[in-house]
Image (tube, rainbow, N blue to C red):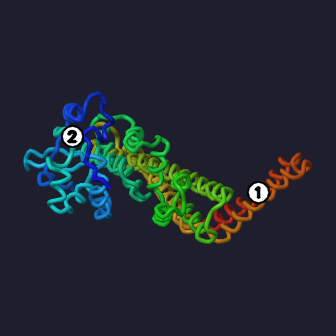
Amino acid sequence: MAKKTFAAGMTNSGILNNNGGDKLKEVQAKSEYNFQYIDKMKIISNPKNEKYSQDGIDALMESIIINGLRHNLSVIYDSEKEQYRLVSGERRYHAICKMEEKQYKLLFPTGIPCKVEKSTISELDEEIMLISANHDVRETTMEVKRWEVSRLKELYEAKKFKGEIKNINAEIAKQLNISERQARKYTTAEKLIPELSELLNANGIDLNQADKFGKLDEDAQQAILNIINKKGTIENEEYQSIKKLSEDRALEVKQYKEELTIAAEQIRKHETLVKHLEEKIQSLQKSTGSEKNKENLEDEIKYITEAKNRAEKEKAKLESRIEKLESQQREKEKLQMAISDSELKKISNIAKTQQALSILENSFDTVKNNKAILKEDIDLKIRVQLLRDRISDLLDNI
């Protein structure tokens, strides 16, 4: 097979004008894309490329020897070191460096074809460019794709803080050639508990599931994990039931926090009142008889002292209320640390009931006509049971 060498017009930036010969194409490449041939000794690796796998170098070297270099390298000139730092093409560069010198000189007599990026580019933009370039030329794992999105999010957050961009997900989508919606799904997946995160990396769950699960609290995610571990999958009805329990817990926690906030604010006001009354008492005690007679002074001190005592008692009640609320919240957190096996069984039974109901509805017109009644009965039983469980929890905490 004839050996192929790199054609100057074949760059990552696109196809050049075909009018004219190879020499014209090379001139176009140099002027339009800042295209240069650079000796391998003047090129250095980029530490930021360490996240990407550098395996298969020997096979890549053989491919380049046989088929030529299909994509040029992308570099940035480092004026301090007088060298070119790689942005894209780390594996290709290492593969070329593994060639025997004779083979290298034969294939790259004037150096390795490189697109030289602007040296004035910021460190943030350099890393963004590096991630984008690696994404374009590599088949990466789910784990690496998630890292790309996560790292780009960090970089774009820094740029947004500087006022350089507005929509982070839109920028991520543009660099990775995905939709904004998909970018948001990757971001939500970062909220998964470790076990579900590992399942996503191992393709045990897909990105759509990860997006749904990541929006739930950790207890709900643990319940989902338990079902997947037992059954290998989770039905939508089971997920919806767990989601409902999660939302109920979130609402309950929110209500507790609101009560705690109100009680704490009342304590603050009473502390201010007590302090004011104490200052007033001290002021009256220092007053002279020329301003008020002794009897009136004693009456006012007595009145203010009683008001102060009432305020202190109210403050003590509020502090006790806060302590009770916090105790109740801790107890509920213990009880709800994870959805129990009995609850999981109930969820499974609900899912089976709903599936059976759906089959009946599709099979019998008579059942279909009574759909609302049947669903209402089932929902009523579930609600009654949930209310009983709630009442039992509340009684335990009184």
Q: Secondary structure at mark 1?
A: helix
The residue beneath circle 1 is 354
* Residue 275 placement (x, y as % from top left): 35, 48
* Residue 373 placement (x, y as % from top left): 85, 49
Residue 146 sits in quarter: bottom left
- Pick whichever, 97 or 279, lies toward us: 97
Of all residues, the one furthest to the front in this rendering is 1
The residue beneath circle 2 is 117
Residue 8 sits in quarter: top left
What residue is drawn where x is 81% and y is 51%?
Answer: 376
Q: Secondary structure at mark 2?
A: strand
**Quadrant of the snapshot with the C terminus:** bottom right
**Quadrant of the snapshot with the N terminus:** bottom left
Q: Which residue type does callout 2 highlight?
A: Glu
Relative to 298, 392 lies left or right:
right
- Marks 1 and 2, Cα distance to the nearest angstrom? 60 Å
Relative to 292, 198 lies left or right:
right
What residue is drawn where x is 92% and y is 49%?
Answer: 366
Q: Which residue type does callout 1 highlight?
A: Gln
Check residue 156 in the rendering and tell me which mark sits there, or answer none.
none
Q: Say few, some or many: other residues with alpha carbon within 10 Å of mark 1 (under 14 / 14 to 19 / 20 or more).
A: some
- Pick whichever, 75 or 251, lies toward us: 75
- Pick whichever, 69 or 32, lies toward us: 69
What residue is drawn where x is 70% and y is 65%?
Answer: 348
Q: CB atoms at circles 1 and 2 under 8 Å apart? A: no
Relative to 377, 265 lies left or right:
left
Q: Say few, some or many: other residues with alpha carbon within 10 Å of mark 2 (under 14 / 14 to 19 / 20 or more).
A: many
Relative to 293, 28 lies left or right:
left
Which mark is in front, 1 or 2?
A: 2
- Pick whichever, 107 or 177, lies toward us: 107
Does residue 306 appear anywhere in the picture? no
Which comes sooner in the sequence, label 1 or label 2?
A: 2
